[in-house]
Amino acid sequence: MNQVRRLLAIGGSWGGISATRAILPRLRLPDDTSVVLVLHRQPIRSELAPILARGGTLPVVEAEDKMALAAGTVHVAPPDYHLLVEPGWLSLSTEEPVKFSRPSIDVLFESAAQAFAERVVAVVLTGASDDGAAGALAVRRHGGTVIVQDPRTAEQGIMPRAAIEAGAAEQVAPLTELPEVIGTALAGVAVAEERP
């Protein structure tokens, strides 16, 4: 198994399942990249991971507490848990919802920024809240890259617009171009340092 040296963190809400299903099958990731994903959802069990895996080449798993990050794998936040990134592994939390959301995109992005710093590429997708904007700013402060879905191509443009208005977006791209933009950004991440 490859050591995880780059991290792709994706957050979405209203319309996020469709957007994610449009992106994942077309992603071309460096071999040392792991993917973490938060989609706002009801606090009930669902078949989200198998739904997202359909038609794609990347395995999609529901994250578990203390699960090791795996390269080439998409780790999805389970319902009603915050998903946090630690150096090399994941943790789950039942802390209070953030902006009415658990899992929270801000929580994911902020922990990813702490753990992977400049080796994070964060993507803000469609949604109807401003969750993700503060976390995206944290990613930028730690040297990471933030890509935002063009609100005009989003099912709900509030979330990507909030990230743009917060000054967090380094790149804005329509949904159809996101897989290529993400792949290019990840390929450009410097991974000379041996972390985690």
Image: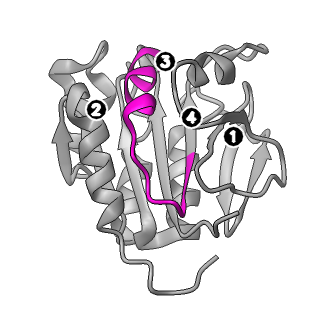
Q: Which of marks 3 and 1 is nearer the N terminus?
A: 3
Q: What element carries label 3?
A: helix
Residue that numbered label 3 is attached to: 17
Q: Earlier in the sequence, mark 2 or mark 4?
A: 4
Q: How many neighbours does mark 4 have within 10 angstroms: few (below 14), some (14-19), or many (20 or more)?
A: many
Q: Which of marks 1 and 2 is nearer the N terminus?
A: 1
Is residue 148 visible to us here? yes
- CA gap, disc 1 and disc 4: 9 Å
Q: Is mark 2 on a helix, strand or loop?
A: helix
- CA gap, disc 3 and disc 1: 18 Å
Marks 3, 4: nearer the viewer: 3
Three-letter code, disc 4: Val
- CA gap, disc 2 and disc 4: 15 Å
Q: Which mark is residue 38?
A: 4
Q: Which residue is drawn at 31% across and 47% down?
A: 182
Marks 1, 4: nearer the viewer: 4
Q: Which of marks 2 and 3 is nearer the N terminus?
A: 3
Quadrant, the C terminus? bottom right
Q: Earlier in the sequence, mark 3 or mark 4?
A: 3
Q: Which residue is drawn at 42% across and 15% down?
A: 18
Q: Where is residue 168 in the image (x, y as percent from the top left)?
A: 26, 52
Three-letter code, disc 2: Pro
Residue that numbered label 2 is attached to: 160
Magenta residues (range): 17-35
- CA gap, disc 3 and disc 4: 10 Å
Of residues 127 and 36, the one nearer the viewer is 36
Three-letter code, disc 1: His
